[in-house]
Image (cartoon, grey):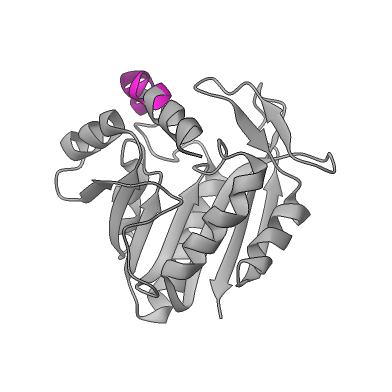
């Protein structure tokens, strides 16, 4: 497990400037993602528990967006380079280094967790552990929004991501794993990003019982 995490962190360290520039405008050109995050933030606010982690925060643009939507948001990421950029770009926000399989958070302390394409590099055999860890840190009623590349194949498909190898997932299979981790699936959204990737984009919104 450690090896692929270290390789992923090093790969993102090598593309900080290019990656950050690509996402400098947040989700300006991604209406589906933008509105799913808006819905997520609204539902988290309704719980009364505003503490929200942006897991795999990268350059910090979504941490800042979540804070702007009224959440007590902070970012966690594996890549020191991404975290350094996030702190420069968003000095009012909080960022820390962490691994998604062992979050430095106490049980039941979050109202929300955002995993925006941050689990795509995880080998399929390890994904249930990440979902269980996210369920662990959510308070009762807390919400997870997981975004990922989707495939219509029956099993996850490994592909050559521009940064480091990644996986696309059958939506129903990932929803099943989310439920097995102890989260109730509230909504699923699948859409065509009309890009050259050849994948669908997908979002699963789930709540801790």
Q: Main secondary structure of the magenta part?
A: helix
Count of all numbered marks drawn on residues in the image: 0
Left or right: residue 116 versus residue 81 is right
Residue in view at x 62 percent, y 57 percent: 204
Relative to 203, is 123 above or below?
Answer: above
- Magenta stretch: residue 176 in it? no
Q: Quadrant of residue 66?
A: bottom left
Place of residue 64 in the rendered image (x, y in percent of width and height, measured from the top left): 29, 49
Residue extending furthest toward the front: 2
Q: Quadrant of residue 31?
A: top right
Left or right: residue 194 versus residue 82 is right
Residue in view at x 41 percent, y 68 percent: 137
Q: Give the quadrant of the C terminus.
A: bottom right
Which of 124/82 is in front?
Answer: 124
Residue in view at x 37 percent, y 34 percent: 25
Q: Which residues are magenta?
A: 11-20
Left or right: residue 54 versus residue 193 is left
> Is residue 201 visible to us here?
no
Q: Quadrant of residue 50?
A: bottom left
- Magenta stretch: residue 17 in it? yes
Relative to 183, is 24 above or below?
Answer: above
Place of residue 158 in the rendered image (x, y in percent of width and height, measured from the top left): 69, 29
């Amino acid at each position: 497990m450690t090896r692929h995490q270290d390789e992923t962190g090093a790969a993102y360290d090598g593309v900080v400037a290019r990656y950050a520039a690509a996402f400098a405008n947040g989700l300006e050109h991604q209406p589906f993602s933008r509105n799913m995050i808006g819905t997520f933030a609204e539902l988290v606010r309704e719980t009364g528990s505003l503490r929200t982690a942006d897991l795999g925060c990268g350059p910090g643009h979504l941490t800042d967006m979540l804070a702007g939507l009224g959440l007590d948001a902070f970012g966690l990421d594996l890549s020191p380079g991404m975290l350094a950029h996030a702190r420069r770009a968003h000095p009012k926000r909080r960022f820390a280094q962490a691994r998604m399989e062992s979050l430095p958070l106490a049980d039941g302390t979050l109202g929300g967790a955002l995993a925006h394409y941050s689990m795509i590099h995880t080998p399929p055999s390890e994904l249930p552990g990440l979902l269980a860890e996210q369920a662990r840190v959510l308070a009762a009623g807390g919400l997870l929004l997981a975004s990922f590349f989707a495939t219509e194949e029956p099993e996850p498909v490994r592909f050559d991501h521009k940064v480091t190898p990644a996986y696309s997932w059958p939506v129903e299979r990932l929803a099943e794993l989310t439920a097995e981790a102890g989260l109730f699936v509230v909504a699923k959204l699948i859409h065509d990003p009309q890009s050259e990737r050849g994948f669908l984009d997908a979002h699963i919104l789930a709540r801790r019982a």
